[in-house]
Image (cartoon, rainbow, N blue to C red):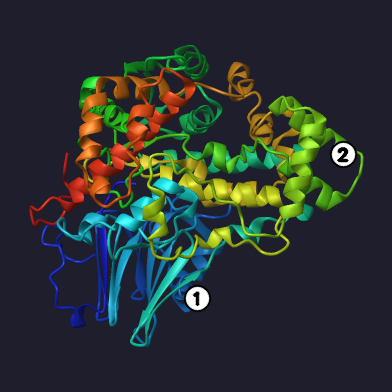
């Protein structure tokens, strides 16, 4: 989400001048902590404040703008834990104990980012790393860039900027004279209990209600919304749920080159059903510069180059149509458990034994994947045999130097969500990993220069409900995200509900590579990553091959170029703090 905030814990003991000269007076001022925010702030009496958007938990879910005295006392007495049970939203909460200890809680959705630097006597937290890091030599952590390129699953709380960590979704940073501690106050593993979950039809009915309430609550917060309708299931669900409560809803479809790049037929079916106009826009390769990062002030270099074209399109749209938020279906595949493995079969076998229903799940997976029963059972046995062990993390070493990784420091601790309880079902391990990956797709743009981005399917009540639904329900009938499809029958057009796959910007990424092949080679051969010994530059010749492997190598080269451009931007020796207003 767009917006800027800074939290300075124990400010009296901190001599460094924070970059708050343009933020006005503190939104909350206490001897133990000061808070500046350009986002909405809700006071918790004299105990603290909440930065961001907050909604009541009990239906009908409504936005919270203030607390009465009794509620504020309860939140303070619980050190903020009460928020996790009775509210949801996109927020960071600051609560001060009577003894001066400070708790900072990030909500479980991860929709509002929060990063921090600690010191012996306190900490500084911000929603934008540009407020925590000075550009120049030493700003970039090359080891973390290497880990990110090798495996996004291997990323923990460290960012790719030296000394900056992420306060993960559902965590609390507690700061007192005794020091700083970080603890998980919310975990997805608290919600993965299939034996207490509802039957398929009941789950679908419940999902329809919860998603409609959450998306509608978000839609009520903004006067004018731009929504990206890709022609797929997830963005269609968001559009259908937002429309009844949106004051103004503009639907835009982005068209790109290549197979699958034109989804206007499906997007038109949606907007026709909603009685809205479809705004068609084309990706413009002229708006892409591979020597510049797509999202320079993000703490990881994981933003793909097509986002530059998307940003340009949305900004041009905003010039013609007043818009104050961008909605997307981002995270939908992940929340709605789009697994394509035998794990749902294993989950059902472990949970229910060899009942008749287990063969239905075997059939469903076969229909969905096209695999025969023997292949599914073989994979299921392999999954079952490894159940209870450490989760497998994907690894891609293409274009990377093995010697660099041999010389790296020992592997850091994985994200705590990747430490499941011993009895965790394999399919739920995969579901939680998907949620973790979705958090890397929430931040689309440089946060101060572009539209507020809302991914409402990542809302806490939606996530918690989906975690409780058994994985075999999600493949019911041989289609992915089956519960979501059943939930929105009669609301989302049937033509879209029947779609099990859709196109994307892969053709545009190929166009970007072909137009910048020489520039990409120069960028990498003379870049920071190559000088650090991180790269295997033989990938540059592999990408010339007109084969499927060559196309994969081209996409990989662009990903490495994005990391290089990001690293160069942060290490540029202008000696200035990163400009959070950069455009």
Measuring from the top left, give residue 385's x and y in whole percent. Answer: 76, 53
Give the camera-side residue of 134 and 385: 385
Give the camera-side residue of 352 and 346: 346
Label 2 crowd bin: few (<14), some (14–19), many (20+), radius 10 Å: some
**Residue name at image x 46 percent, y 19 percent:** 547
- In this orientation, does residue 61 appear? no
Q: In which image quadrant can residue 400 be found?
A: top left
Label located before the other in sequence (2 or 1): 1
- Helix, strand or loop at label 1? It is loop
Give the camera-side residue of 194 and 251: 194
Horizontally, residue 404 falls left or right of residue 392, namely: left
Mark 2 sits on what residue?
Answer: 357
**Residue name at image x 32 percent, y 19 percent:** 511
Mark 1 sits on what residue?
Answer: 78
Q: In which image quadrant can residue 186 be found?
A: bottom right
- In this orientation, does residue 87 appear? yes
Measuring from the top left, give residue 370's x and y in whole percent. Answer: 72, 24
Determine whether 456 is above or below 374 in the image: below
**Residue name at image x 61 percent, y 55 percent:** 391
- Helix, strand or loop at label 2? It is helix
Q: In which image quadrant can residue 380 be found?
A: top right
Distance from the alpha carbon under mark 2 to that under mark 1? 44 Å
- Find out whether the residues at labels 2 and 1 contact each other: C-beta distance under 8 Å: no
* Circle number at residue 90: none
Horizontally, residue 561 falls left or right of residue 486, namely: left
Determine whether 440 is above or below 81 in the image: above
**Residue name at image x 35 percent, y 35 percent:** 538
Counting the numbered discs, the total is 2
Determine whether 343 is above or below 322 in the image: below
């Amino acid at each position: 989400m767009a917006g800027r905030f800074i939290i300075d814990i124990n400010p009296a003991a901190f001599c460094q001048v924070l970059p708050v000269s343009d933020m006005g007076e503190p939104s909350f001022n206490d001897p133990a902590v000061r808070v500046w925010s350009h986002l909405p702030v809700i006071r918790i009496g004299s105990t603290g404040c909440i930065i961001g958007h907050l909604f009541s938990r009990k239906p009908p879910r409504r936005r919270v703008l203030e607390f009465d005295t009794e509620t504020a006392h309860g939140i303070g007495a619980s050190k903020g834990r009460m928020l996790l049970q009775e509210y949801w939203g996109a927020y960071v909460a600051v609560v001060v104990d009577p003894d001066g200890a400070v708790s900072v809680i990030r909500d479980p959705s991860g929709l509002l980012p929060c990063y921090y630097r600690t010191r012996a006597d306190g900490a500084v937290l911000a929603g934008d790393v540009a407020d925590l890091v000075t550009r120049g030599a030493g700003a970039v952590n090359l080891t973390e860039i290497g880990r990110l390129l090798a495996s996004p699953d291997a990323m923990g709380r460290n960012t790719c900027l030296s000394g900056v960590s992420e306060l993960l979704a559902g965590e609390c940073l507690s700061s007192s004279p005794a020091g700083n501690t970080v603890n998980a106050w919310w975990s997805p593993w608290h919600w993965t209990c299939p034996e207490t979950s509802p039957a398929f039809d009941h789950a679908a009915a419940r999902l329809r209600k919860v998603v409609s309430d959450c998306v509608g609550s978000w839609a009520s917060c903004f006067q004018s919304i731009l929504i990206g309708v890709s022609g797929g299931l997830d963005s269609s669900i968001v559009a259908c749920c937002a429309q009844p409560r949106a004051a103004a809803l503009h639907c835009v479809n982005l068209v790109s080159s290549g197979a699958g790049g034109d989804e206007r037929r499906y997007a038109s079916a949606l907007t026709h059903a909603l009685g809205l106009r479809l705004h068609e826009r084309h990706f413009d390769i002229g708006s892409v510069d591979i020597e510049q990062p797509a999202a320079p002030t993000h703490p990881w270099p994981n933003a793909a180059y097509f986002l530059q074209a998307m940003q340009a399109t949305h900004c041009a749209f905003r010039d013609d149509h007043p818009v104050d938020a961008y909605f997307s279906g981002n995270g939908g595949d992940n929340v709605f458990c789009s697994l394509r493995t035998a794990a749902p079969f294993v989950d059902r076998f472990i949970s229910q034994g060899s009942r008749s229903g287990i063969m239905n799940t075997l059939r469903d997976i076969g229909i969905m994947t096209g695999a025969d029963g023997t292949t599914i059972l073989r994979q299921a046995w392999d999954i079952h045999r490894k159940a209870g062990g450490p989760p497998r993390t994907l690894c891609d070493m293409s274009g990377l130097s093995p010697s660099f990784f041999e010389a790296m420091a020992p592997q850091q601790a994985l994200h705590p969500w990747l430490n499941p309880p011993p009895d965790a079902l394999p399919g739920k391990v995969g579901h939680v990993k998907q949620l973790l990956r979705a958090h890397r797709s929430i931040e689309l743009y440089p946060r101060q220069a572009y539209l507020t981005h809302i991914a409402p399917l990542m809302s806490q009540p939606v996530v918690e409900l989906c975690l409780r639904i058994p994985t075999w329900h999600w493949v019911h009938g041989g289609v992915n995200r089956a519960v979501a499809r059943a939930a929105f029958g009669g609301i989302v057009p049937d033509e879209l509900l029947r779609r099990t796959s859709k196109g994307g910007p892969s053709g545009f990424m190929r166009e970007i590579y072909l137009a910048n092949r020489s520039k990409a080679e120069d960028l990498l051969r003379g870049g920071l990553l190559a000088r650090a010994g991180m790269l295997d530059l033989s990938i540059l010749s592999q990408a010339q091959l007109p084969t499927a492997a060559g196309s994969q190598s081209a996409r990989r080269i662009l990903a490495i170029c994005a990391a290089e451009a990001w690293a160069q931007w942060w290490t540029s020796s202008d000696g200035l703090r990163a400009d959070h207003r950069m455009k």
